[in-house]
Image (cartoon, rainbow, N blue to C red):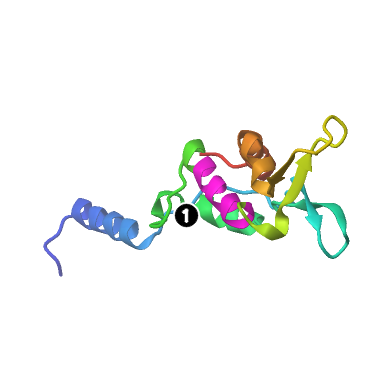
Amino acid sequence: MSDLTDEEIEATRELNNLKTNKKKSNMRIKKVNLEWKAFYYSWNEHKLVFTNVLCDMEEEIAKKVKRGKKDKWFPVYDYESFKEWIQLELMSHYWSKSEVECLIGDWCSNPEPTLEKHDIWWQLKPNLDRICEYIIREMNINF
C-alpha cells in the first residue's frame, strides 16, 4: 500500500491527466471556396483572362491558422501576422512573374502610347486588407 493521502492521490491523477491530454484547438475554421479574381494576359488564349488568386489556398490557410504560435517558420496568431503571411504567399506566387504580366497604358492621347508592365501582385497589393478581411470572414477565423 502507499503512504499517500486521498488528496495527494487525486492531485497526482490530475497532474498525469494534464500531461497526457493534449490541448485541442477550439477554433473551427469553415471549409469554403475562396475566390478573388485578378486578370493577366494568357499567351495560350491571346487575350486577357481572369484567374482566382486564392484557388486551392483554403487548406493551407486553415493549417497555418490552426498552428498559430507553434509554427516555427512564420507564426500566425493575430490579424497583422496573418496579413503579413498572406502578403508573402501572394507575392511568392504572383510578383514579377512574366507569365502573369500585362502591359497597360493609354492608346489615344499620345502619338506614341505610354505602356506600363504590371503583374497580378500589382492588382492585389492595394487590396491586401480587403483580401485578408474577406478570408477571415468567409473562413470564420478568430484570433
Q: Measuring 81% from the left and 62% from the top, which residue is drawn there?
A: 43
Say whether residue 104 is left or right of residue 63: right
**Where is 77 relative to 44, above or below?**
above
Work out whether residue 133 can be spotted. Answer: no
Which residue is at a point 66% across and 36% down the rendered structure image?
A: 127
Q: Is residue 113 above or below residue 95?
A: above
Q: Residue 129 or 91: which is nearer the viewer?
A: 91
Residue 106's image quarter? top right
Membership of 92 in magenta stretch: yes
| Relative depth, front residue between 76 and 17 | 76
- Compare residues 49 and 66 and report the one nearer the observer: 49
124 lies left or right of 85: right
The rendered magenta stretch, by its main secondary structure, is classed as helix
Q: Is residue 20 above or below residue 6?
A: below
Residue at coordinates 21% horizontally, 51% vertically from top-left?
Answer: 7
Q: Position of residue 24 (x, y in %)?
A: 47, 54
**Quarter of the figure that contains the N terminus:** bottom left
Q: Position of residue 50 (x, y in %)?
A: 82, 50
Magenta stretch in the rendered image: 82-94
Question: Which three-letter amino acid code belongs to the residue tagged 1?
Answer: Arg
Q: Residues within 10 Å of mark 1 (few under 14, many from 20)?
A: some
User: Given the current orientation, which residue lies at the most extreme top position?
Assistant: 109
The structure residue drawn at horizontal position 24% and vertical position 53%, both measured from the top left corner, is 11
Asked whether residue 121 is in view, the answer is yes
| Residue under label 1 | 67
